[in-house]
Image: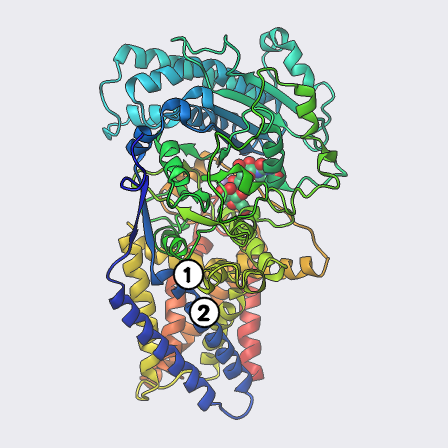
């Protein structure tokens, strides 16, 4: 072993050239203060006053919110891991065991073939296989998914040695075969044609067997007969909401017979469907993770845990060793509770019509949060220290010393019946699980709330964004899916703000003020809806009665408005382009922010308040990972998908139509009197809103299945006209 001081296992680079940014931000803040001053000193008399106060409140909100977004732009850090140094310092025998959890919930929208591809990809990590255990938590309790796992455990015997022999990347068979058959040249050629063909045939045959079973909804007869004992676990199965615990060890790597075709040890592979009863609330993914934490403590009991969602396969077999560099670094690793990797998506188009990549967050804000003491825990793609996840507080003496931590290691015989009890509905009765232990319950973003509470116990977390993506998953591919997902996220975040975990009180004195501000950016996503809806509707409506809500172009007060808007959007464009975006994807992102703010966030705010008042319960709508071929085709052409009826679409269309009416009115007036009235800023604002809403107007006149439903158009039109006429008459 070499000395640790001169060869750290990871390095941290602080971003340079922030002075220019700081100057820009300071000047913007001055501009914002001037806007606030203008509103306060130019209060009009009469009826228009309420609108003026609303504008003032909105601008106060936007300004405050902008200030929060500055914390994570102040001093971002970037991390680099040195896995070669790790190998020099730790022999293969000295590396810690690792438990990997894969979560799935519904075979209909999370197809078993996709699930096992993710499972196979993490079984193939470049890591001693006798130290790896992979667990699938199946909240769908599906025998088809179990059957797919059986097939995967057999296929793994050929796939793992093939990957290791030829250095295959990525190690999700589906992703690899897709790349190797495309002409992109992303896959090296020295893969031995014959062997490649053979393993590909094995995969294709397995895939068609699983898909056939999936379509039939039935496990093949011959499998049922030969594996009768295993499938008898489904005998008492009533529905996926009502069944006992099913725990099966498909591969036990302490069993001398668990070998691949070359005679190497295989990683342990476990299937788990926790008990579900209709009368027992199961706490969604948080519940699944906590069951996994308990059950795995009797199997791999590894001190390091990785969790991925069933669609997020490992894209780099080296990531595991890289992540360990952070935990095992003697100098700087001991305070680290978790290492979060970004979530990137395989199915995004170049111009990203739904802006799924959240580029500014992953490339700018998360490195910034890391610099402030800890990135958010955002679920999939996160490595944890088991003891921290189980509730351990940080103490100055803390060391990551897994060899001598005194935990019992497993004797080779697993008592399945004992372990199964840990997955029963009653297993958490009168315990701290979901409160002080494991992932925290009661919040639709179990990850964010848990990560925050971990940091308030003295730990740090770290953001690892390697050049080669660590994990790749699937993003929603319709507008409604996107809006529903963001409703869940923003609702969960806002509930944290309203709960006892609100970082302003709960984090005070425990985490840095900058980190609290960084958190507020996300926790306050939802209430953004109020100011945004006001700004997107009221100034436009005032075009109709000719009253101005902004300073005139000739006034000096016009300058701060122009400056702040230009600097804000100019800078966000630069940030986006630097994060590998295009001008069009930036424009699309602005649109999606508007849509989320006027719909997802509105419903999230309402539901969160109802929840606090005790009128509604936490829900978790799982994002679909499969799509109708026609929907996919439109998605690939960047055509916005409406199709379904939803109150969210009614709101979007109503706002789009109000702005169209007001803008047309302004245009007619301008052509008769020759000036933009009542104020240039107001007409520009509604013009920009019309431009950004183009896909909605197209959706109204399109003819394909993904068009805006006619009934939505009709009701929105009635709303828009009523609001416009009503407003013009009343004022
Ligand atoms: O009752 C449930 C519901 C969901 N899941 C799993 O949780 C994961 C996340 O669900 P998904 O619908 O894909 O949500 P996303 O919004 O895409 O997920 C992001 O946001 C979630 C919090 O809202 C985190 O849990 C995820 O890790 C993070 O990737 C999936 O693997 C599901 O199978 C369960 O295991 N049990
Ligand atoms: Mn997902």
- Label at residue 406: none
Q: Nearer the viewer, residue 270 or 44?
A: 270
* Residue 226 vertical placement versus 477 (above, below): above
The vertical placement of 379 against 574, above or below, is above
Residue at 58% x, 37% y: name it. 289
Please report the residue visible at 54 percent of the width from the left and 16 percent of the height from the top. 252
Secondary element at tag 1: loop
| Residue 85 on image: x %, y % | 29, 33
Which residue matches tag 2? 659
Report the front residue among 727 and 395.
Answer: 395
Q: In which quadrant of the rendered view does residue 286 lie?
A: top right
Q: Is mark 2 within 8 Å of ligand 1?
A: no
226 and 719: which is toward the camera: 226
Q: Quadrant where the N terminus lies?
A: top left
**How many numbered badges does the structure rendering display?**
2
Expressed as whole percent of the image width and height from the top left, the position of residue 652 reads 50, 60
Q: In what quadrant of the picture does the C terminus appear?
A: bottom right
**Residue 107 in sight from this viewpoint:** no
* 231 shown above or below 242: above
Which comes sooner in the sequence, label 2 or label 1? Answer: 2
Where residue 601 sits: x, y (%)? 54, 59
Disc 1 target residue: 693
Specify few, some or many for label 1: CA neighbours under 10 Å numbering under 14, 14-19, or 20 or more.
many
Q: How is the image coloured?
A: rainbow
Mark 2 and mark 1 in contact? Answer it, CB < 8 Å. yes
Instruction: Identify the residue at the far bottom of this view.
Output: 45
Left or right, 313 with reference to 710: left
Query: In the image shown, does 82 or 152 lie closer to the viewer?
Result: 82
Q: Residues within 10 Å of mark 2 (few under 14, many from 20)?
A: many
Image point 38% across, 83% down: which residue? 34
Residue 560 visible somewhere in the drawing: yes
In the rendered image, residue 221, in percent from the top left (x then y), is placed at: 61, 9
């Amino acid at each position: 072993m070499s000395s640790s001081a001169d060869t750290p296992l990871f390095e941290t680079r602080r971003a340079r050239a922030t002075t220019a940014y700081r100057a820009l931000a300071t000047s913007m803040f001055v501009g914002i203060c001037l806007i606030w001053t203008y509103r306060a000193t130019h209060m009009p008399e009469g009826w228009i006053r309420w609108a003026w106060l609303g504008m003032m409140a909105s601008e106060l909100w936007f300004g405050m919110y902008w200030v929060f977004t500055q914390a994570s732009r102040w001093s971002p850090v970037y991390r680099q891991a040195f896995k070669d140094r790790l190998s020099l310092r730790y022999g293969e025998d000295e590396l810690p065991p690792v438990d990997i959890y894969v979560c799935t919930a519904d075979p209909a929208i999370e197809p078993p073939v996709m699930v096992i591809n993710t499972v196979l990809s993490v079984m193939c990590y470049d890591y001693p296989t006798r130290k790896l255990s992979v667990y699938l938590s199946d909240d769908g309790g599906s025998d088809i998914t179990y059957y797919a796992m059986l097939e995967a455990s057999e296929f793994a015997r050929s796939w793992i040695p093939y990957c290791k022999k030829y250095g295959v990347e990525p190690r999700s068979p589906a992703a690899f075969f897709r790349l190797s058959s495309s002409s992109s040249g992303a896959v090296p050629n020295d893969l031995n044609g014959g062997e490649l063909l053979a393993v590909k045939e094995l995969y294709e045959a397995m895939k068609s067997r699983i898909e056939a079973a999936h379509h039939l909804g039935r496990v093949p007869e011959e499998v049922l007969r030969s594996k009768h004992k295993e499938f008898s676990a489904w005998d008492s199965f009533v529905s996926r909401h009502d069944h006992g615990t099913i725990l099966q060890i498909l591969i036990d790597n302490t069993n001398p017979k668990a070998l691949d075709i070359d005679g190497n040890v295989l990683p342990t592979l476990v299937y788990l469907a926790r008990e579900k009863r209709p009368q027992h609330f199961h706490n969604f993914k948080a519940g699944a993770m906590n069951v996994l934490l308990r059950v795995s403590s009797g199997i791999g009991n590894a001190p390091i845990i990785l969790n991925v969602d069933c669609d997020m396969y490992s894209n780099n077999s080296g990531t595991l060793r890289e992540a360990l560099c952070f935990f095992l670094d003697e100098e700087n690793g001991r305070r680290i509770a978790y290492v979060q990797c970004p979530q990137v998506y395989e199915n995004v188009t170049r111009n990203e019509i739904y802006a799924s990549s959240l580029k500014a967050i992953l490339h700018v804000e998360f490195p910034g949060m890391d610099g402030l003491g800890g990135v958010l825990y955002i679920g999939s793609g996160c490595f944890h220290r088991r003891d921290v996840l189980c509730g351990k507080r940080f103490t100055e003496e803390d060391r990551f010393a897994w060899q001598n931590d005194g935990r019992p290691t497993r004797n080779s015989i697993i008592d399945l019946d004992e372990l199964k009890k840990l997955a029963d509905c009653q297993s958490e009765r009168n315990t701290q699980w979901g409160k002080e232990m494991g992932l925290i319950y009661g919040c639709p973003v179990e990850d964010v709330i848990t990560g925050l509470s971990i940091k308030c116990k003295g730990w740090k977390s770290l953001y690892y964004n390697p050049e080669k993506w660590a994990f790749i998953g699937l993003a929603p591919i319709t507008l409604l899916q996107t809006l529903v997902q963001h409703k869940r996220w923003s609702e969960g975040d806002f509930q944290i703000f309203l709960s006892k975990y609100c970082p302003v009180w709960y984090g005070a004195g425990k985490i840095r003020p900058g980190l609290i501000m960084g958190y507020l950016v996300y926790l306050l996503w939802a209430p953004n809806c109020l100011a945004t809806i006001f700004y997107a509707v009221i100034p436009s409506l005032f075009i109709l009665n000719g009253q101005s809500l902004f300073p005139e172009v000739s006034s000096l007060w016009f300058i701060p408005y122009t400056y702040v808007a230009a600097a804000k959007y100019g800078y966000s464009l630069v940030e986006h382009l630097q994060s590998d975006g295009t001008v069009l994807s930036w424009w699309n992102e602005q649109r999606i922010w508007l849509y989320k703010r006027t719909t997802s966030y509105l419903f999230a705010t309402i539901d969160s308040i109802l929840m606090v008042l005790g009128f509604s319960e936490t829900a978790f709508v799982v994002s679909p990972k499969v799509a109708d071929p026609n929907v996919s085709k439109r998605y690939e052409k960047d055509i916005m998908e409406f199709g379904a009826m939803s109150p969210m679409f009614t709101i979007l269309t109503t706002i789009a139509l109000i702005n169209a009416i007001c803008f047309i009115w302004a245009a007619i007036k301008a052509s008769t009197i020759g000036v933009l009235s009542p104020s240039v800023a107001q007409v520009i604002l509604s013009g920009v809103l019309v431009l950004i809403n183009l896909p909605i107007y197209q959706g109204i006149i399109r003819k394909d299945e993904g068009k805006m439903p006619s009934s939505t158009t009709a009701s929105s039109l009635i709303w828009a006209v009523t609001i416009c006429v009503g407003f013009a008459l009343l004022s």
